[in-house]
Each structure stands twice: as structure tokens, then as C-alpha cells.
Image (cartoon, rainbow, N blue to C red):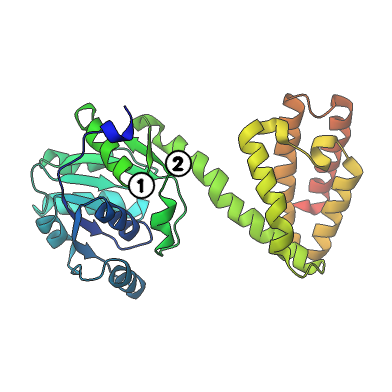
Amino acid sequence: MNPSQQPRPARLAVGVVGAGRVGPALACALQQAGHRPVAVSGVSDTSVRRAARMLPDVPLVPPAQVLELADLVLLTVPDDALPSLVEGLAETGAVRPGQLLVHTSGRYGTAVLDPARRAGALPLALHPAMTFTGTEVDVQRLAGCSFGVTAPDELRLAAEALVIEMGGEPEWIAEENRPLYHAALALGANHLVTLVAQSMELLAKAGVEHPDRMLGPLLGAALDNALRSGDAALTGPVARGDAGTVAAHVSELRRHAPAAVSGYLAMARTTADRALAHGLLKPELAEDLLGVLADTESDGGDR
């Protein structure tokens, strides 16, 4: 079914519980699709300012009042806070029968919403596979963004329509696969930020004036190649089996950035294993390389 043929949900009053980086952006996207934000809750000064900036004229109220005013409620709180929030809202009678209750956690499916479902709510798990800045640019980035969607069979069309209205593309994730799905995204996106920031710091120590300019084209090409070709895109000294170069890297990191050594060794071992499994690294070179990695670790590379 193409997007123009999707059933469009009735225009809904939208509420946001948790004005972090995600909730206001999704509310803005729903507003652009014709829905009406009516209430938002936030605790920290940053959340309050963000809500005022991105959802002007939308009243800031306690969570229970958000549910009182909204037909569609976005629960955009940290993962660890979600179960107790849902239980509390259900126990206090804040949940209304027929109310769409949507959380945006990657970790959870709809089971975490069971207390609210028993109170008559309609549960949806809609997780945007996107990093958020807490600014208006996030709304633009939702165009073409995949959403990990988990929903009861009878709500699949509604879930799909909401995602498409926000500019996203639904990707169905089984309830039992949500933790693995989320781990995969964190492994790629969150750790990428750490690696890039660390790489920029090292380039600056090496005297590079604009590390971001140097890395931009290289990382852009590497990402594009990896998405197109997977492990076949592997290059560099580990994939080539240049054990001497890898040993030199570790030596320099010990001198200038000892905190980076353990990460380098872990990634080098993983890269070597994958390159070997895919026939990119010759077995005779792999033996020397893995020997170097084992030696550098035993010599204190992880300290």
C-alpha cells in the first residue's frame, strides 16, 4: 500500500509526557500532518524551555492532565522510567478507554504498556531510528526515517498511518526482538559518536588543524561503502594484516591516549575476525596480527 492510500487517522488531540529531545519533535511532525498538540509535561528547565520553543502556546501541565486532554499521548521518557510511569498513570485512573498510548522506547514493545491496556488504552510502540538534537532540525530529519514499530494486529494500520504522517517509514519489530533491535542501533549510532569524537581528539594531538574537515569525506565514504557492501568494504591495516602497523598504533596510543587503547584493541580484534571470516584477511597474516593484538594486551594495552 502506498502512502497516499494509507488510512488516515482522525485528527487527534496530541499530548506529550516528557519534553525531552524526542517528544516535541514528534508532536511538531504530527501537527504538520493536521493533528493538534494540546498539552505537554516537562520537569527540567531545559525541557520547559524546549517545549515553549517548539510547541508555543501549548500548555505545560502535569502528566495526568496531559492524558485528560489528549486522544493520542506520546510517552517520551527515558527507558528506565517508562514502566513506573505507565503503572502510575494506570493506578491513578489517568488512562482513558480508547486513548492511543504511544511510547518511543527502542528497548520495549507494547508489553510495557499492559497496565494501561488493561485500563482500556490502545498501546503502540513507535521508535524513531534517529538521533535527536532537541531542536527544530529534528522534525526535518524524520523525513524518510525508519521507525521500529510494534503493535497489536488490530492497531497495525493505525500505527503505520501515524508513522507515515510523521514522514517516517514503518519497520515491524516483533515484541521479543525489541531488545536486540535496540542493541543493534546503539552499537552502530551511539558508539559511532564515541569513535568519531575520539578520532578527532587524536588528530588534534597530531597537529591537524581541522580534524572535522579531514574526517568528513573519509567517514562519509566509509559509511556509504559499509551500507552498500557490508564487510566487503573493510580496508586498513587490520583487514590487510599489517601487524607491524597495528603494533605501532598501539604504541602511540599508549603514549598519547592510553584511555583509547582498550577500545582500539577490541575493535581491531573484531575487525580481524570479520575480515578473516569473509576472506579479506589471509590466514597466515591473521596469525601474526592476532599475535600482536594478544601481546599488546598482555603488555598492558588494556590499562
- Residue ranking furthest to the front: 4
Q: Please give the name of the residue rendered at 9% of the width and 57% of the height, measured from the top-left corner.
A: 68
The secondary element bearing badge 1 is classed as loop
Q: Please give the name of the residue rendered at 14% of the width and 43% of the height, measured from the top-left corner.
A: 10
Q: Can residue 303 be seen in this view?
A: no
Q: In which quarter of the image is residue 161?
A: top left
Dividing the image into 4 quarters, which one contains the N terminus? top left
Q: Which amino acid does label 1 sit on?
A: Ser
Q: Quadrant of residue 204?
A: bottom right
Residue tagged 2: 182
Q: Please give the name of the residue rendered at 8% of the width and 48% of the height, measured from the top-left corner.
A: 96
Dividing the image into 4 quarters, which one contains the C terminus? bottom right
Q: In x, y percent, where is residue 222?
A: 69, 44
Q: Is residue 85 visible?
A: yes
Q: Horizontal placement of 114 versus 211: left or right?
A: left
Which residue is nearer to you in this view: 183 or 300?
183
Q: In x, y percent, where is residue 142?
A: 40, 49
- How many numbered markers are drawn? 2
Q: Which amino acid does label 2 sit on?
A: His
Which residue is nearer to you in this view: 259 or 32?
32
Query: Could you classify mark 2 by the number of other residues whose Cα lies within 10 Å: few (under 14), some (14-19), or many (20 or more)?
Result: some
Q: Quadrant of residue 170?
A: top left
